[in-house]
Image (spheres, rainbow, N blue to C red):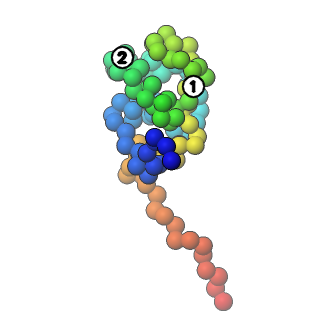
């Protein structure tokens, strides 16, 4: 259907996981300045490349379209795309995968 992997096959690298955890997977907005302050241990070019990749994959949304510099990041706001939040939580925290429920409960007679 498209260029994106099926949701069950989301594979994230360490930088992507760090950014997603910093933004938060609950869907709340994070100011770009706050994001850059929390991610100061990551190299600027690597940070921009990783954030750009997450935005290209539509995993992270922003109120600005072109974010190519650290100043652009600082003037924007970011959040995890709610359409992917559940799958991203499973990819970020693989040990927290929930057990699949076994359908509807049967009535007793």
Asked where in the image residue 16 lies, by quadrant, the reply is top left
Residue 33 visible within the image: no
Residue at (58% x, 20% y) in the render = 64
Q: Residue reaching furthest front?
A: 1
Residue at (59% x, 32% y) in the render = 28
- Depth check: give the residue in front, 88 or 38: 88
- Depth check: give the residue in front, 59 or 93: 59
Could you tell me residue 71's position as x and y percent? Answer: 49, 10
- Identify the image quadrant of the C terminus: bottom right
- Please, is residue 41 above or below residue 21 in the view? above
Asked whether the residues under the numbered discs 2 and 1 touch, taking CB atoms below 8 Å apart as contact, a structural biologist would say: no
Residue 91 is labelled as none
Q: How many marks?
A: 2
Could you tell me residue 87's position as x and y percent? Answer: 48, 47
Q: Which residue is mark 2?
A: 45
* Label 2 vs 1, first from the N-terminus: 2
Q: Residues within 10 Å of mark 2 (few under 14, many from 20)?
A: few
**Which element type, helix, strand or loop, lies under badge 1?**
strand
Relative side of 105 to 3, left or right = right
- Please, is residue 13 above or below residue 34 in the view? below
Q: Residue reaching furthest bottom?
A: 109
Q: Which residue is mark 1?
A: 62
Query: How far apart, in angstroms, are the residues tagged by discs 2 and 1?
Result: 18 Å
Residue at (40% x, 49% y) in the render = 9
Could you tell me residue 40's position as x and y percent? Answer: 38, 18
**Which element type, helix, strand or loop, lies under badge 2?**
helix
Residue at (36% x, 17% y) in the render = 45
Residue 58 visible within the image: yes
Could you tell me residue 68's position as x and y percent? Answer: 46, 15
Q: Residues within 10 Å of mark 1 (few under 14, many from 20)?
A: many
């Amino acid at each position: 259907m498209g260029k994106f992997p099926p949701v069950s096959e989301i594979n994230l690298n360490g930088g992507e996981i760090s950014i997603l955890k910093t933004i938060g997977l609950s869907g709340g907005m994070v100011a770009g300045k706050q994001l850059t302050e929390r991610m100061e241990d990551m190299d600027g070019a690597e940070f921009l490349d990783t954030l750009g990749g997450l935005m290209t994959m539509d995993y992270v949304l922003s109120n600005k379209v072109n974010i190519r510099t650290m100043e652009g990041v600082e003037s924007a706001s970011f959040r995890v795309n709610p359409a992917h939040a559940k799958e991203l939580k499973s990819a970020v925290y693989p040990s927290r995968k929930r057990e699949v429920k076994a359908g509807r409960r049967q009535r007793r007679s």
